[in-house]
Image (spheres, helix red, strand yellow):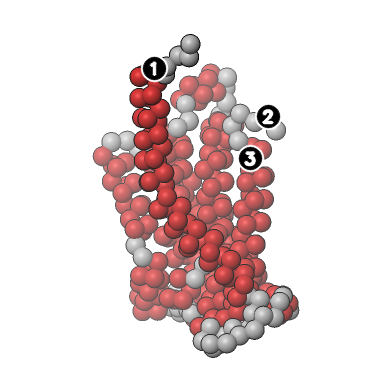
């Protein structure tokens, strides 16, 4: 004689089904937005990059990989890539070092003073990139030069954005001022997650401050640093807002990053399809750099023997 299913089992299955339905209901909107705004846009981008569409014309034709050939032969494209590479390297080093120093300092503060300084250092993160760029542009142009003239400091008496050789550093300063806020908070959380017992044991064994930092602190921070390197590298390779607000790619195209070049080709020079091809190339570069960063750093995390 067959056994009838128990009421409890049926109720449990129904409860699980309802739970799964709720999870799907919450996940579906995000999944659909991802499909529409990333997957669909990506597929359309690949398609348009193989046409001669100007972005305005009602007709266009398929030309295959010709836009990619044009991009790879364009010296202006490679100059923009070289700017992004130099800028990204300086940004990565600056963000990691400055954020780590601030996080170490804040980690040693206690009480209300600690809370106050943490709030102050995080303020730049909530400001708009364009707003920050415009404010600093006015500071470089109207505030700092008079101070430099009054103090007799020659390099400060001129706008740092006015020279092709120094404009990149002006943009970098602004980016570091705002870009170190979130990394500082993340690194501070990482520092506070390190077990105090490890430091005590290292002290008993006679380890100095540098040895404890190198062998205990750094391994615990590597996952956070990896994430910061990836996000900062992506930000450096795709920088646009600061440059557009402060220099618009000048002077003499000295700060024409790849994002600015893509924007100009698409909006000003009628080369929409070529700009999409440049975007695809930039996507590949960011993906490769992110993959290599994860691959290299994953071997040095806490718990690995390598």
Between 55 and 205, the one lying in front of the other is 55
Q: Which mark is residue 305?
A: 2
Is residue 147 in view?
A: no
Q: Nearer the viewer, mark 2 or mark 1?
A: 1
Q: Secondary structure at mark 3?
A: helix
Mark 2 near mark 3, Cβ–Cβ under 8 Å?
A: no
What percent of the width, then of the height, locates residue 246?
44, 76
Q: Position of residue 107 (x, y in %)?
A: 40, 38
Tag 2–tag 1 contact (CB < 8 Å) = no
Q: Position of residue 119 (x, y in %)?
A: 31, 49
Which residue sits furthest left? 112
149 relative to 45, above or below: below
Residue 231 makes an appearance in the image: yes
Q: Secondary structure at mark 2?
A: loop
Circle on res. 298: 3
Q: How far apart are labels 2 and 1 at the CA level?
A: 51 Å
Badge 3, how many Cα within 10 Å: few under 14, some, many 20+? some
Q: Nearer the viewer, residue 301 or 3?
A: 3
Measure the C-alpha gap from mark 3 to mark 1: 49 Å
- Name the residue rendered at 57%, 22% in the picture: 206
Return the x and y of residue 191 as percentages of the image width and height.
Answer: 46, 36
User: Quadrant location of the C terminus?
Assistant: top right
- Residue at image location 34% in from the left, 58% down from the top: 126
In the drawing, what numbered circle is on residue 131?
none
In the displayed image of the protein, which residue is found farthest to the front? 1
Relative to 124, does residue 274 appear above or below in the rendering?
below
Residue marked by disc 1: 6
How many residues crowd mark 1 within 10 Å: few (<14), some (14–19), many (20+)?
Answer: few
CA gap, disc 2 to disc 3? 11 Å
Mark 1 residue element: loop
Is 231 situated left or right of 137 in this image? right
Which badge, 2 or 3, comes first in the chain's sequence?
3
């Amino acid at each position: 004689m067959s056994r009838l299913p128990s009421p409890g089992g049926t109720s449990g299955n129904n409860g699980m089904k309802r739970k799964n339905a709720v999870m799907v209901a919450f996940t579906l909107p995000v999944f659909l937005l991802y499909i529409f705004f990333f997957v669909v846009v990506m597929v359309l981008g690949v398609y348009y990059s193989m046409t001669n569409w100007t972005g305005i014309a009602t007709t266009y034709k398929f030309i295959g990989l010709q836009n990619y050939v044009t991009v790879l032969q364009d010296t202006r494209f490679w100059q923009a890539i070289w700017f992004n590479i130099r800028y990204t390297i300086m940004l990565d080093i600056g963000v990691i070092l400055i954020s780590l120093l601030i996080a170490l300092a804040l980690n040693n503060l206690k009480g209300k003073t600690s809370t106050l300084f943490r709030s102050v250092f995080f303020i730049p993160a909530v400001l708009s990139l364009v707003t920050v760029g415009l404010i600093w542009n006015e500071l470089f142009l109207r505030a700092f030069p008079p101070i430099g003239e009054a103090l007799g400091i020659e390099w400060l008496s001129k706008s740092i954005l006015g020279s092709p050789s120094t404009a990149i550093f002006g943009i970098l300063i602004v980016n570091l001022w705002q870009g170190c806020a979130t990394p500082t908070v993340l690194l501070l959380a990482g520092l506070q997650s390190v077990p105090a017992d490890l430091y005590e044991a290292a002290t008993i064994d006679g380890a100095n401050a540098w040895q404890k930092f190198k062998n205990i602190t750094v391994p615990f921070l590597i996952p956070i640093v990896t994430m910061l390197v990836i996000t900062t590298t992506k930000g450096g390779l795709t920088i646009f807002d600061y440059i557009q607000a402060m220099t618009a790619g000048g002077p003499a195209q000295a700060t024409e990053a790849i994002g600015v070049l893509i924007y100009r080709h698409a909006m000003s020079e009628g080369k929409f399809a070529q700009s999409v091809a440049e975007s695809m190339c930039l996507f590949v570069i960011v993906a490769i750099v992110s993959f290599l960063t994860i691959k290299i750093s994953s071997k040095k995390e806490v718990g690995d023997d390598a």
